[in-house]
Amino acid sequence: MSVNASAGKTPAVCAAVLQDVFGYDAFRGPQAEIVSHVSTGGDALVLMPTGGGKSLCYQVPAIVRARAGHGLTVVVSPLIALMHDQVGALLQAGVAAAFLNSSLSSEAAQALEKQVLRGELTLLYVAPERLSTARFLALLDALHQRAQLALFAIDEAHCVSQWGHDFRPEYRALELLHQRFAGVPRVALTATADEITRADIVTHLQLQAARCFVSSFDRPNIRYTIVEKKDGTQQLLRFIRERHSQPNGHEAGIVYCQSRKRVQEVAALLCEAGLQALPYHAGFDAAVRQRHQDRFLREDGLIMVATIAFGMGIDKPDVRFVAHLDMPKNIEAYYQETGRAGRDGEAANAWMAYGLQDVVNQRRMIDESPAADEFKQVQRGKLDALLSLAEASDCRRVRLLAYFGEASAPCMNCDNCLLPPALDDATESARKLLSCIYRVQQASGMAFGAGHITDILRGKRTEKVSQHGHDKLSTFGIGADLGETQWRALLRQLIAREAIQVNAAHFNTLTLAEAARAILKGQAPVWLRRASEKKAVLRSSRASKGVATAPDGQPLSLGERECLAALKVWRTEQARAHNLPAFVILHDSTLRAIAARQPQTVADLDGIAGLGQRKRAAYGTELLRVLGTARGSDDRALGEIGV
Ligand code: ADP
Ligand code: ZN
């Protein structure tokens, strides 16, 4: 496998398809090279983060190759809902596309097969289990004999690997493509980057000779913020209100919680607070889950409160925030989940609240899982990496990318970059904490939990303290200078650094671990964030609350914002009429660009990003009418107030 070997020039025909069909001026990042390689018949493995723009990497080649007489592109995709929306979007753009899955009646499926044989389709989406049926393979054989198979695109290719987070045995059947349809180019795409999964994809799909395109995994438009959990849900509410309420309504977001019970509670609380929130977890039956998911995709400004059961295959581009109310289990999961924000490339937030309890819970889940010891060890290591990200006082993005093997410079778009936390040297306090844990255990022959240890340090004569005689210890009251929260912060940090171990099987008691030695000896400094800094972060972010802007970054005027609101209402009607998500009709950014340009004729709509030829022809006049009406009511209003 060669990695980004020769840099070829994108054929003009690819750029023309991008412009005419999709209405975009330029390819993003590595898209140009990928599209050019695949259009000219090359095999490719594409690793690109969520929102990077994978779909165009096979859709543009499919159109280019179909126009050149190579026939049909078959897209293997694991999720029916996603197929439906992707095909809907392609039809909207005027591309002949269809899907074949279990949702079709057998008559409809047969009619579709005839269409395929007549060469009427450019793209056909199928589920992997359908692809490997004798009937479908026979259909493909017939096309292959006539040299009418243009391309195989394998989406979510990590599903082939049992190391990926979403192994699907049906994907193994795709191994046969290479032998059976020799000479037909293949492109496999995934947002999962880790080494071992990647190697598995190459082996199982026999892509050894394919070119591998690895994008940067950075998502520059996502702002990362991690706060210390206090009153979790109230903090969440403040975060949503401060950063995500718009004059015309709320913005779409996802809130992840650890348990089903918590999902229910949080969804109810958000609704009580006047937000539109829906719960989602595996405890609901399939119909309810489907309904909530559809509403989230189709309506504007809904908040989905969910367990990790929600998200795979959600390609809604305008999710403005992903909030974690509980800590996920590792950085891969965190990155995948936060990656669902801001796929449209516009400003979005990834916000997480975490506390000591999260650390304890995650450790316990690992300890209590039935997995083999080596596996648990790997899981612990991964959790530790996430903990040190949460505890970090330097750039979050630099750490995230470093985890995926990518070097970068401070980003100026994370909490720590925007407001560097003030740090105090807490080495002395850390030593007090460690020696307290040690002395208590020595004196009593048993270990105690975090609450008791802090009580001793702070010199609180609780019943338990007196009962065990811990007020007689030399460490009693030596930490009265720090508050409860600071001791907890220090505890978390020392747990993250493996100086302290939490014994989940023994009532979460604390004992010293390996890294304690260096700290006790004064060989490893410990820094602690000064309390109260977080408030400042929140204050500063209030100023950056989103105001709708034109493509040049200028805020829209009041009149333009009213046009935008009218366009959104129109879009909702269209979406409902076509049974498609609103973003499939037109993106937010496209609507904003239209509102900012104030076109008078259909020709004035030329060159607006996201408005291809087909959509301009279909919607141009309508858009002008909506704008005209909105402007008219505006003029009348101005007339009434005598301007
Ligand atoms: P992925 O599958 O990698 O998560 P998508 O293919 O869904 O990403 O693309 C994410 C969003 O970016 C989509 O809304 C898509 O229309 C948009 N997009 C992709 N490529 C471009 C481009 N070259 N110019 C403008 N928008 C693009
Ligand atoms: Zn940063």
Image (tube, rainbow, N blue to C red):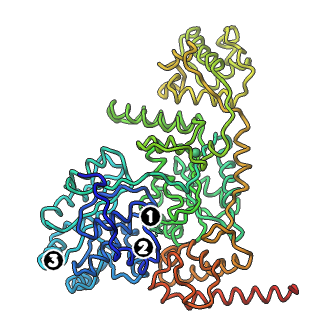
Amino acid at pointer 3: Ala
Q: Residue at x 68, y 48 (%)?
A: 235
Residue beneath disc 2: 85
Which mark is first along the chain, 3 or 2?
A: 2
**Residue 62 rendering spot, x and y as whole percentages:** 30, 74
Whether residue 29 appears in this view of the structure is yes
Q: Residue at x 69, y 49 (%)?
A: 234
Q: Quadrant of residue 312?
A: bottom left
Q: Quadrant of residue 255?
A: bottom right
| Viewer-side label of 2, 3 | 3
**613 relative position to 36: left or right:** right
| Viewer-side label of 1, 2 | 1
Foreground pick, 308 / 188: 188
Within 8 Å: ligand 1 and the Cβ of disc 1?
A: yes
Residue beneath disc 1: 28
**468 relative position to 56: left or right:** right
Within 8 Å: ligand 1 and the Cβ of disc 3?
A: no
Residue 382 position (above or below residue 629): above
Residue 164 position (above or below residue 83): above
Amino acid at pointer 1: Arg
**What is the CA distance from the residue labelled 3 to the residue labelled 1?**
31 Å
Residue beneath disc 3: 147
| Viewer-side label of 3, 1 | 1
Residue at far right of view: 642
Q: Secondary structure at mark 1?
A: loop
Amino acid at pointer 2: Asp
